[in-house]
Image: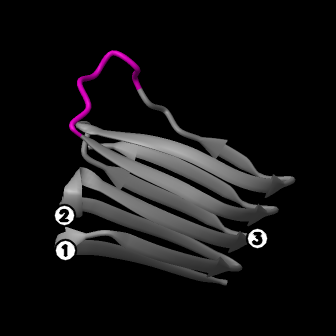
Amino acid sequence: MSSSVRYVKASNLERVAINARFASLKIYFDNVELQNDEANIFINGSLSEIMLFFPREWKVFVNINSVFSEVNTGQEEENVFEKKVYINGNLNLSELKIRYI
């Protein structure tokens, strides 16, 4: 079991791959500029808790294949969204939480 916090800093982020096994992972995307106002994130998680923190102006679309897993997006539909993030991947006995800052 491991625990990790990461702060992503990028000026033209296009793709991110996240692999977590037996882990607790927090990733902050608050200091990121997206290429063409869109980004793709691929998640592969097993027996893990993954928390992603995005700016409120980003619209997040989640398409996760899950086996005994939970996905909590917590998005408010009333916001005005300038950028789009597409999250795809696989979760097994894991939890994905998306928070907005």
Q: Position of residue 54 (x, y in %)?
A: 32, 50
Badge 1 crowding class, 10 Å Cα cut-off, few under 14, some 14 to 19, many 20 or more, is: few
**Which quadrant, please, contains the N terminus?**
bottom right
Any mark on residue 92, and which? none
Mark 3, Cα crowd under 10 Å, few <14 / some 14-19 / many 20+, is: some
The residue shown at (50%, 77%) is 17
Residue 40, by quadrant, is bottom left
Q: Report the colour scheme.
A: one colour
| Whole-percent x, y for residue 98 in the image | 47, 47
Disc nearest the viewer among 2 and 3:
2
- Front position in the image: 59 or 99: 59
Given the image, on which type of amino acid does mark 1 rest? Lys
User: In front: 35, or 48?
Assistant: 35
> From what the image shows, is residue 12 above or below residue 96?
below
The dot on residue 32 is 2
Q: Which residues are magenta?
A: 76-82
Labelled pair 1, 2 in contact (Cβ < 8 Å): yes
- Please state if 23 lies on the left or on the right of 73 as rendered: right
Residue at 18 percent across and 74 percent down: it is 10
Disc 2 marks a residue whose amino acid type is: Val
Q: Which circle marks residue 47 in the picture?
A: 3
Q: CA distance from mark 2 to mark 3?
A: 28 Å
Mark 3 or mark 2, which is nearer the start of the sequence?
2
Q: Is 93 rendered above or below residue 62?
A: below
Q: Nearer the viewer, mark 3 or mark 1?
A: 1
Q: Nearer the viewer, residue 14 or 93?
A: 14
User: Can you tell which mark lies on residue 9?
Assistant: 1
